Image (spheres, helix red, strand yellow):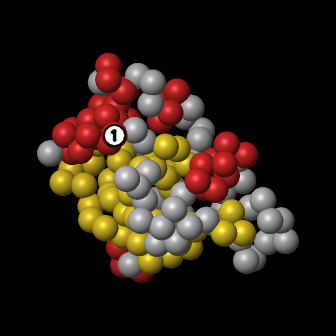
């Protein structure tokens, strides 16, 4: 079973709509040690939800890892990892951070507990709860 992840992006910097247009891109720019540890665990085929930060604060789309993690070719530091990502589809409707925080099943979700973390694992139960809220 593939792992599942949530990736945060500021839509003015790189939106899910842009990923859909590009179809595939290298996910880079992550410097937080815990987020980099999570990227190191990403494998080709893993499922991903894309979360827009900023004014939106909502889960907006689905994607998948198109590669395993690898050192950022633009950087000289081998600890700075990137991976390739492919767009899947937009959520039927965005799931807001307020909705996530209001769901008691999601109180331990890193999205609620660690608001500054940009890459985080998503459990099967968390994934199902988000999918259900998006309908």
Furthest residue in direction bottom, as rendered: 22
Furthest residue in direction right, as rendered: 76
Q: Counting other residues with Cα less than 10 Å from the Cα at mark 1, is it few (<14), some (14-19), or many (20 or more)? A: few
Whole-percent x and y of residue 87? 36, 70
Horizontal side of residue 114 vs 92, given as left or right: right
Q: Quadrant of residue 109?
A: top left
Image height of 45 relative to 55, above or below: below
Whole-percent x and y of residue 121? 49, 43
Q: Is residue 51 visible?
A: no
Task: Give the residue drawn at x 27%, y 48%.
Answer: 94
Task: Give the residue drawn at x 50%, y 75%.
Answer: 25
Q: Along the line of sight, which residue is nearer the eye, 18 or 41?
A: 41
Image height of 34 relative to 112, above or below: below
Q: Is residue 129 visible?
A: yes
Horizontal side of residue 120 vs 77, given as left or right: left
Image height of 71 relative to 46, above or below: below
Furthest residue in direction left, as rendered: 135
Task: Give the residue drawn at x 42%, y 42%.
Answer: 122
Whole-percent x and y of residue 51? 42, 50
Image quarter of the C terminus: top left
Task: Give the residue drawn at x 52%, y 27%.
Answer: 113
Whole-percent x and y of residue 40? 64, 56
Residue annotated with mark 1: 124
For label 1, the SS is helix
């Amino acid at each position: 079973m593939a792992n599942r992840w949530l990736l945060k992006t500021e839509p003015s910097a790189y939106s899910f709509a842009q990923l859909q247009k590009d179809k595939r891109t290298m996910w880079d720019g992550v410097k937080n040690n815990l987020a980099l540890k999570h990227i190191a665990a990403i494998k080709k085929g893993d499922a991903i939800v894309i979360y827009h930060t900023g004014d939106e604060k909502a889960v907006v789309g689905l994607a998948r890892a198109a590669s395993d993690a690898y050192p950022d070719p633009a950087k000289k530091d081998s600890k700075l990892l990137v991976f390739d990502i492919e767009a899947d589809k937009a959520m039927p409707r965005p799931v807001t951070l307020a909705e996530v925080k209001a769901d008691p099943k999601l109180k331990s979700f890193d999205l609620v507990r660690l608001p500054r973390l940009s890459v985080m694992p998503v459990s099967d139960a968390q994934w199902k709860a988000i999918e259900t809220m998006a309908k």
